[in-house]
Amino acid sequence: MTTTTDRARIIFGNDVGDKAYADACKGKERFARKFGDDSGVTYHLAIQDVPVIGELLGVRGLALAAEGAGPLEFPADESPLVVGNIRMGFGHYRISMAIASAAHALGRTPYWFDLASFEGSAGSKVIAHQNELYSLGSRLSQRVGAFDKLYWEPLNSEGFRQLTYNAGDQKTMELAAPLCADLPRDVPFVATHAWPAQAAVHAGLTHVVNAIPDNWPMALHLSEGAIHAVQTPSAYLGYHQLRGMDKKRQLKPMPLDAIRQCGHYVDHELVSNIGRDCEARRKRLLGGSPVRWLLSVGGAGAQQELFAAIVGRLLPYVRNDQATLLVNVGDHKDVWEALEREVAGLSELAERHFGDFAGVARLASDALDGELGGVHAFCDDDIFAAVYSSNLLMRCCDVLVTKPSEFSFYPVPKLMIHRVGGHEAWGAIRAAEVGDGTYEMDNTDEVLCAIDTFQYERELVATMCDNIERADRIGIYDGAYEVVRLAVAGR
């Protein structure tokens, strides 16, 4: 399979230069030598069931068809929308779930299309390899200060920002284009990472929306040929101007028809219940009930020491019935085991909900209007359950403790801990300005002080609920719906 346009050479009218283009080509060649080049292979796709979110959100999946199968055919009575994604941490999966939820609410059938899941294909091998490196870097950045300061932070804030980085990705994702070749050219396709968007455009799809996750403009997220959806006004102007994506020259802006400001990507189940959930929080907070804290561990499993300090600070409040602690470690059981070793008394207090998604759903539902105390730990080997458990628990919690990642944009009061990568900084800035979260807290003492403050001055959290409702009235959290409508309309 060959592409009709070399999108690595000129990006939105900006020539990347001979050296950068040659480097991009060499990068693709290195991946091809290591993982193969299946550009001449025809991959047919088959429809399959998806665990957890299949029932909850009406999601179906796309996988490789059996040998000898024909081209993919969507059911005639469906209006499909393909959600192209990868697992890189939990963030891109979570955004994909928000898009799928909105699509389902708008009467579409969402199809889960994880480009890293096609074992044996060159494209999946490349993506899996990159994800392993990113996860390792995230963990190291939280353990080795020099690595974070001298390498990881600059890479995530400035290295990924450069137009030359996008040239390399564009060339490499030509290897993933065969995975998209079986899709109808005009099927609505929403990508929650630039790589699926690039692969889909290389394959000739015409209704591709590239749902950009971050609030800091980076060329990493560009996919020329797709419509770029962003969540905030600052991201809209920054991406349109290709701000800072070349340190030596002013770049030509992105065309206006290639970018849309849509709003925050949030699940229908959360958006449609904002009023009810905020009112319940105010009653708990101001009525003397325990403050419910949700601590959600990211997909890379980083920030172990900080989590231990937070849990240790909250346990006395839990013992005095002043706080309830919910800890979702995702699919990182080792993180929970480390917390039990490091935090005295945690093991004895905690009720574990491991591998029991149905039980998690019941607990979250019962807690919406009922009582909830103690410490509850959540873990699941299934990636869908691991990610979506936090979505369920968000509705019944009072404060979400999170780094400024995709959670920055969710309609729940947030205590923002230190980022993992410089690109996340502007997520916290957005939350602080909307007023549904704190500013980013740079050190452990500051975080622990905020915990004490929220325990005793609960009006601060209640005010965040007021701000959430105010933002909801002007559509700030409607981004997932808008992305779906944009993909369906195409250009």
Image (cartoon, rainbow, N blue to C red):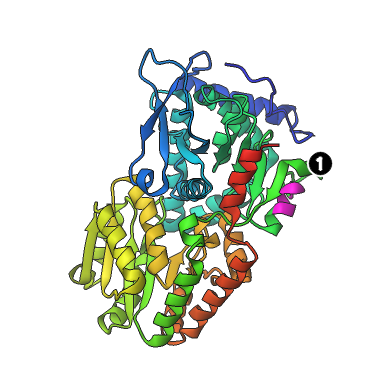
Give the image location of residue 341, x and y in percent.
Answer: 23, 64
352 sits left or right of 491 in the view: left
- The residue sitting at the front extreme is 77
Q: Quadrant of residue 313?
A: bottom left
The quarter of the rendered structure image containing the C terminus is: top right
**Secondary structure mostly seen in the magenta stretch:** helix
Residue 242 included in the magenta stretch of the image: yes
Residue 414, above or below 100: below
Residue 426 included in the magenta stretch of the image: no
- What residue did someone put label 1 on? 252
360 sits left or right of 39 in the view: left
Is residue 408 visible in this depiction of the protein? yes
Q: Badge 1: how crowded within 10 Å, few (<14), some, or many (20+)?
A: some
Q: Residue at x 51, y 25 (%)?
A: 31
Give the image location of residue 179, x and y in percent.
Answer: 49, 25
SS assignment at label 1: loop
Q: Nearer the viewer, residue 304 or 227?
A: 227
Is residue 445 visible in this depiction of the protein? no
Give the image location of residue 437, x and y in percent.
Answer: 54, 70
Q: Nearer the viewer, residue 56 or 84?
A: 56
Q: Residue at x 37, y 87 (%)?
A: 288
Q: Residue at x 39, y 70 (%)?
A: 397
Q: Residue at x 58, y 51 (%)?
A: 481
Q: Magenta segment range?
A: 236-243
Residue 137, above or below 142: above
Q: Nearer the viewer, residue 333 or 114?
A: 114
Disc 1 marks a residue whose amino acid type is Lys
Residue 341, above or below 222: below
Give the image location of residue 203, x and y in percent.
Answer: 59, 24
Q: Nearer the viewer, residue 464 or 30?
A: 464
